Amino acid sequence: MLDRWENAVSADASDTDKPIPGRDWWRQAVVYQVYPRSFNDSNGDGEGDLQGIISRVPYLKRLGVDAVWLSPHYPSPLADGGYDVADYRDVDPRFGTLDDFDELVAALHASGMRIVVDIVPNHSSSEHPWFREALASEPGSAARARYIFRDGTGENGDEPPSDWRSHFGGSAWQRVPDGQWYLHLFAKEQPDFDWSNREVREDFHRTLRFWSDRGVDGFRVDVAHGLAKDLSEPLRSQTTLDKGLPLDGSDPLYDRDEVHEIFEGWRRVLNEYDPPRSAVAEAWVPAERRVLYARPSELGQAFNFDLLTAPWGAEEFRMTIAKNLAEAETSGASSTWVLSNHDVVRHPSRYGLPAGTDLDRWKMADGADPAVDVAQGLRRARAATLLMLALPGSAYLYNGEELGLFEVPDLPADALQDPIWERTGHERKGRDGCRVPLPWDSDAHAFGFSTGTPWLPQPPWFAEYAASGEEGSEGSTLEFYRHAIAARRSLQRGESLEWLDAPRRDVLHFARHDGWHVIANFGDEPVALSGRVLVASGAVSADAEVPAETTVWIRPA
Ligand code: NOJ
């Protein structure tokens, strides 16, 4: 039996020079998330930076992605990895300067890629000048009205104004020296804005224009479902977080109907540009409410995290895909697909853990218990990725997944930086395990990430996943991603798929436009195929079978 990696579709290299044309480039784009701190360090301070990204533009171009999404690059005390912004219209000096930013935009554009930046409107950093001004001002002042300050409850006002909880653990209220409390749905260094305040609204319009004027192509909108809050007295209890989904618009803090008016205003600003700037909402809400954010009159797209949370299984994936495509059709948006990002356990690790492992508990444990089945995790991760890349809509990749990187679950306690670690009293380790700086060169200091000491320690096994070893190596995950993305670029047409009968319940089979088919075998046994293999997530045999836990794209016989 001849084992080989099938990659019969190769893109004409010149294809990748051309961005997806037109206003709607984002509808079918492959977007690569760069976590700036962890991507590539050019100045040896142990943290990634913009010049580091610029030097890897040729790598990104070879990977074939259509756009780069940059996690926050703004000045920030990094209480939450940059999602605590001290100045929305500048670059953190750790990452570089506005000139570096312009150079990055130019370099990506010259290579046919677009750039999407993160925008964080629910909260600022407590170091933002507005919050400092609020602290220095009287209760009831205009400066305090940009945030959410309230008097406490209890006899001396020393109880928080309500029972609202922070996502990162503990109360969502923090007391200030004059006795008032302010709201922070995340860390206490991230005070929430009051979006009923006109100044807040206007300032974000200014920020959207500032980056759009610099050539940014789109925005990823952090916690989009949190901006509008019901702050009428008495403050009502949450119906979510502790009690779980579904959200239905009745919660005082999340997914309130009033939020849509804010994004209609944003759309008007984004449409001042030609082409209009794109936007994608991060909104952890049920699919039928998520599409509201994705309406053309609002942001245009909303992240769908359903694949990311779906257990490994044909039926679970099929239902998720079908539901989201139907929802996208009703909203007029295109769907989005995500398997990994900077907030979740990397997907090879998820798929290599025993079914039903509670990931929060797994990350609580000291070390990695249970252990990840590395071979199975990577096999399934590649199969899931190839399935995702075959779907209509846009696919969001997280830096390092193209190397097959696993989560680092056993970072030493004194290295952890995610605020979740402290706020849960050292119960949950948080998200640092997927943010460990990338390995570029297996033989170099810090695997080529930095000449200094990386801000999170890289484990020795990162050497096996370094880009240097995977580059040009047949069957490597990096080459697999390159081939799959190139094939997608040449095959992807239309925005629908047709489900076909599969031979077994643990197999998915569908057709895309122009007659290419996708077979995803979630089972333990091979399944027969008839046709010419275009791309495969694993080694396929000459016997025309799809092996266990493998996806193939084929031209049917
Ligand atoms: C979602 C971001 O993805 C996450 O990293 C961050 O901690 C929260 N929003 C708060 O901004």
Image (tube, rainbow, N blue to C red):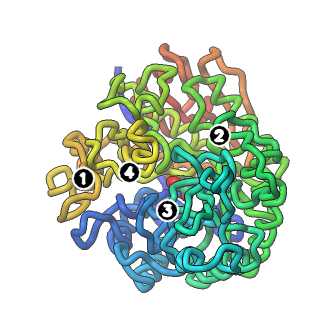
For label 3, count other residues whose C-alpha is less than 10 Å away and answer few (under 14), some (14-19) or many (20+). many
Which residue type does callout 3 highlight? Answer: Glu
Query: Alpha-carbon distance for marks 2 and 1?
Result: 43 Å
Task: Say whether mark 1 is within 8 Å of ligand 1.
Answer: no
Marks 3 and 4: which is nearer the front?
Answer: 3
Q: Position of residue 26 (x, y in %)?
A: 65, 61
For label 4, count other residues whose C-alpha is less than 10 Å away and answer few (under 14), some (14-19) or many (20+). many
| Quarter occupied by the C terminus | top right
> Is there CB contact under 8 Å for labels 3 and 4?
no
Query: Between disc 3 and disc 2, whose residue precedes?
Result: 3
Which residue type does callout 1 highlight? Answer: Ser
For label 2, count other residues whose C-alpha is less than 10 Å away and answer few (under 14), some (14-19) or many (20+). few
Query: Alpha-carbon distance for marks 1 and 4?
Result: 20 Å
How many marks overall? 4
Query: Alpha-carbon distance for marks 2 and 4?
Result: 25 Å
Q: Which residue is mark 2?
A: 241
Which residue type does callout 2 highlight? Answer: Leu
Res 392 seen here: no
Q: Nearer the viewer, residue 273 or 518?
A: 273
Query: Between disc 3 and disc 1, whose residue precedes?
Result: 3
Q: Residue at x 75, y 42 (%)?
A: 287
Query: Alpha-carbon distance for marks 3 and 4?
Result: 20 Å
Which residue type does callout 4 highlight? Answer: Arg
